[in-house]
Amino acid sequence: MNTQTPSLSEAAAPLPRIAVLATGGTIAGAAADATNTAGYQAGVVSVEQLLSVVPALSTVARIAPEQVASIDSKDMSTALWTTLAQRINTLLAADDIDGVVITHGTDTLEETAYLLHLTVKSDKPVVLTAAMRPASALSADGPLNLLNAVTVAAHAAARGQGVLVAFNNKIHSARDVVKTSTYAVDAFHSPEIGALGWVQDGRVDFQRSVVRPHTRATEFVIGANWPHVEIVSSYAGVSRIAVDALVTAGVRGLVVAGTGNGSIHASLAHALADAASQGVAVVRASRVGSGHVMRNGAAADDALGFVSAGSLNPYKARVLLMLALAAGGAGPVALQKAFDTY
């Protein structure tokens, strides 16, 4: 019998190396009672423990774990955003890292994902995932979401798609995805145009690609200084008190969560117009949850110096406005171009 040792070219290629960065959240949460899915403490389970309950990960990728933070994501800060984005860019610049997965709380996941979508400077996959049930719960959803996120990050088709969110077998673009339920396992959707694809049983299938510029195609970079941008809401009987106080406090930008198509109560509109006349950037978004805010042209936005958020919700509009202002964007024309582009 003639036996031959396989050549190096014939040997199986090594599995991709994926960095898993943990930041806390429900996926790392624990409660004393396995039936308790609300009264738990977020961020107490380490990244090593999260990985240990998903042995199938070893068949998908070589994992490089790192604990970046251990917080409830309701407490996410711009300082932690800076740390996370800088660490991701450093990792992806290394030849031995093929992609990054971030475990995150669900409360602010959509904001972090969009921030990274605009500031990561690599074509390598970056995938966020999370859980609606703590790690200690019966039928915890975190382990499968983590496995699916690593599976997506290790897949060639994920490269160049910008930052992704893998959740409940769906793959979403960071720009489109929002949290839509306070309790359901299927808590994340892309209401306006749907998910990019799906992941199940090791299979990854993209149905469409991201069109708007992202990652390496943006001018945005993470820095230490974040412009002060706040969000105000329009509702029945709203006063101008909050806007006036924020302008006095030195805010550089205001995003208004308007009714319907970004419409604004008259008293609030007067306050925002005064703010814009003082150089404060004003962006109209909608509190509705889906759809897009149409620019009103000379009849309103042009005359008042307001900017339309398009299909971005108020929280993502705040992220883009902060980055645009930090990049030197000034005036409604330049800022509107940023919102129309990204």
Image: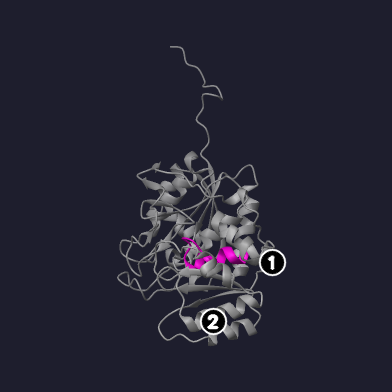
Mark 2 or mark 1, whichever is nearer to me: 2
**Residue 12 vertical position relative to residue 36 in the rendered view, above or below:** above
Q: Secondary structure at mark 1?
A: loop
Residue 261 highlighted magenta (yes or no) = no
Give the residue furthest to the front: 299
Q: Which mark is residue 224?
A: 1
Classify mark 2: helix, strand or loop. Answer: helix
**Residue 96 pos. (x, y %):** 61, 43
Q: Is residue 74 left or right of residue 37?
A: right
Judge whether 272 appears above or below 2 on screen: below
Q: Position of residue 288 (x, y in %)?
A: 39, 69
Residue range of the region highlighted in magenta in the rendering: 306-323
Q: Is residue 328 left or right of residue 245?
A: right
Marked residue nearer the N-terminal end (2 or 1): 1
Please check the rendered image and state whether residue 319 is part of the magenta-colored stretch, yes or no. yes
Percent from the top left, x then y, of residue 304? 57, 73
Instruction: Tell me if mark 1 has few (under 14), some (14-19) or many (20+) residues whose alpha carbon lies within 10 angstroms of its own.
Output: few
Count residues near mark 2 (Cα–Cα under 10 Å), then give few for <14, some for 14-19, many for 20+: some
What's the CA distance linking mark 2 and mark 1? Answer: 33 Å
In the drawing, what numbered circle is on residue 270? 2
* Closest to the observer, 250 or 34: 250
**Quadrant of the drawing holding the C terminus:** bottom right
